[in-house]
Image (cartoon, rainbow, N blue to C red):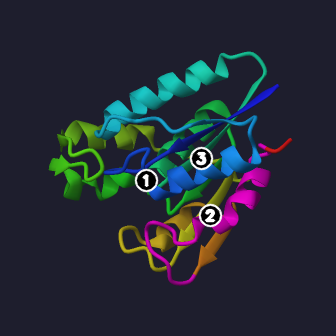
Amino acid sequence: MSNTLIYIHGFLSSPASHKAQQTRLYAERHLPGLNVLIPDMPNTPAAAHQRLDEIISAELNKKDNQLALIGSSLGGFFCTVFGERYNLPAVLINPAVRPHTFGDAFVGEHRNPYTGVDFTVTPDDLDCLRDLHPETITPSRYWVMVQEGDETLDYRHAMDYYRECRILCEPGGDHSFQGFERHLPEVVAFLRLNS
């Protein structure tokens, strides 16, 4: 039996993001047998979904491979999509909830600050996000971590949508979820990656 963790970064982010690298370093130090994947995803939501589905499907097709997910922001939304699709446990950090409903603000030209890549978000991307939105979720699959000081997303939307899930709500903080590394031992335990 092997364990694989996939960390899914958010919009306008990359595998170089702070939380992704904290997760990788923690696994290297404490869980040397854990396979950690931090995909370098396309910038647009529709293409990111397609790439993630390919990666997750490939991992699930490996014999005796136990898979778990961590996702931040839009990555948290994708974790919910794949958690429901493939029955996977996931930890969601300041997750985007119903991103198609506020995506109009993101239609247009962008530059990824990590990579310098220019790209365009189209209405088709919002249609994709709307179509992916799970009608129902299985609360036991998710641990949701939010900080009230999130300047990008209203934490109360996550508190409401995931209200039957395990939730950690901290005062202050920001969208990057300050102090995430403090919770990594418990994250690993929740995802059953140390067994």
Residue 24 is labelled as 3
Q: Earlier in the sequence, mark 2 or mark 3?
A: 3
Image: 72 above or below 145 = above
Position of 70 relative to 87 (above/below) = below
Residue closest to the eye, 173 or 88: 173
Q: Earlier in the sequence, mark 2 or mark 1?
A: 1
Q: Amino acid at mark 3?
A: Arg
The quarter holding residue 146 reads: bottom right
Residue linked to disc 2: 181
Looking at the rendering, in which quadrant would you find the C terminus?
A: top right
Report helix, strand or loop for mark 1.
Answer: loop
The quadrant holding residue 167 is bottom right
Residue 185 is a magenta residue? yes
The residue tagged 1 is 17
Label 1, label 3: how far apart the Cα atoms are:
11 Å
Q: Kindly give the residue lying farthest to the left in the view shown.
A: 109
For the residues labelled 2 and 3, the Cα–Cα distance comes to 11 Å
Residue type, numbered disc 2? Glu
Q: Is residue 142 above or below residue 164?
A: above
Q: Which mark is residue 180?
A: none
Q: Residue 112, position in %: x, y?
A: 25, 48
Q: Nearer the viewer, residue 48 or 127?
A: 48
Of the 4 image quadrants, the one containing the N terminus is top right
Image point (23%, 36%), residue name: 124
